[in-house]
Amino acid sequence: MLTITALFIVWCLLIALTQLIFLPWLGKRVMGDGRTAAIWYFNVAYVHVIHRLMAYGVDIIPQSLYPGPIVVVANHQSPVDPLLIQSQCRFKIRWLMASEYMIESLSLIWELSEAIPVNRDGQDSMALRTALRHLKSGGVIGLFPEGRIEGGRNAIQPFNEGAGAMIAKTKAKVLIATVDGTPMNDDIEEAMLERSNSVVRFIDFISFPESMSGDEITFALRERFAEETGWPLVG
């Protein structure tokens, strides 16, 4: 009985130390809070073991936990794209994500990452308002202007006009990244477990002139992706 009591006390102390010391310490290093930081470290291990991630251009990524307002813009090839990019950034990126990918089995990830669900009918003004508020408060938003991943690889699909409009309205800086070599499966649960040789390249961290309109920014971004990847503009 004494041994069981002692083990219970030790267990309670470990939980207390984790909650009061270890998690806050992690949160000061990445992501800003302990629980999310713990998930971030798990994700770093996951993308390297399962997706054998290679990352380039990471020296341009801001190192502050609160570097915003920033819009992270990337091409879209796989449901795991946000996990690959977030693994290289110490700050939390709130991704605009298609609602159908936010499956119940990964609810803890969506909760801690504060992902913003989007209905892909072009009428989701609530998601846009949430993203704009977050940027205006100094946060970081991640988005995939191509919207869908069904358009095929090795090509730049048409960009949603809302990407440039969001940047123009908030005057946020833009972190541009490309992803390649990701799982071929469009189902998020299967893609999470499919081995790949994924590559993320961070190609620029820029501010667009205040005089540029949303449409001009969208056009410039799409041209930049085509220039960096060598992929054709389609659609």
Image (cartoon, helix red, strand yellow):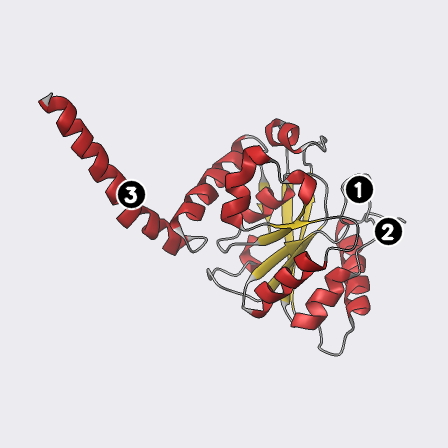
Q: Nearer the viewer, residue 71 or 199?
A: 71
Query: What secondary structure is found at the residue carrying circle 1?
Result: loop
For image coordinates 75% across by 67% down, the residue present is 165
In the picture as drawn, the residue positioned furthest to the top comes out as: 1
Disc 2 residue type (three-letter): Leu
Relative to 190, 2 lies left or right: left
Q: Is residue 65 above or below residue 191?
A: below
Where does residue 173 sit, x and y in percent of width and height?
63, 67
Q: Nearer the viewer, residue 6 or 56?
A: 6
Q: Which mark is residue 233?
A: 2
Return the residue at label 1.
154
Instruction: Give the Cα distance between marks 2 and 3.
Output: 50 Å
The answer to whether the residue labelled 2 contacts the one labelled 1, judged by CB atoms less than 8 Å apart, is no
Quadrant assignment, res 176? bottom right
For image coordinates 82% across by 45% down, the residue present is 155
Where does residue 79 sit, x and y in percent of width and height?
67, 39
Q: Which mark is residue 32?
A: none
Q: Is residue 83 above or below residue 129?
A: above
Relative to 185, 116 lies left or right: left
Relative to 231, 65 lies left or right: left
Where does residue 200 sit, x and y in percent of width and height?
63, 45
Q: Is residue 229 above or below residue 205?
A: above
Q: Assess disc 3: are there few (<14), some (14-19) or many (≥20) residues with their C-alpha within 10 Å of its C-alpha.
A: some
Q: Which mark is residue 18?
A: 3
Q: Earlier in the sequence, mark 1 or mark 3?
A: 3
Q: Nearer the viewer, residue 121 or 73?
A: 121
Position of the N terminus by quadrant: top left
For image coordinates 62% across by 40% down, the residue present is 102
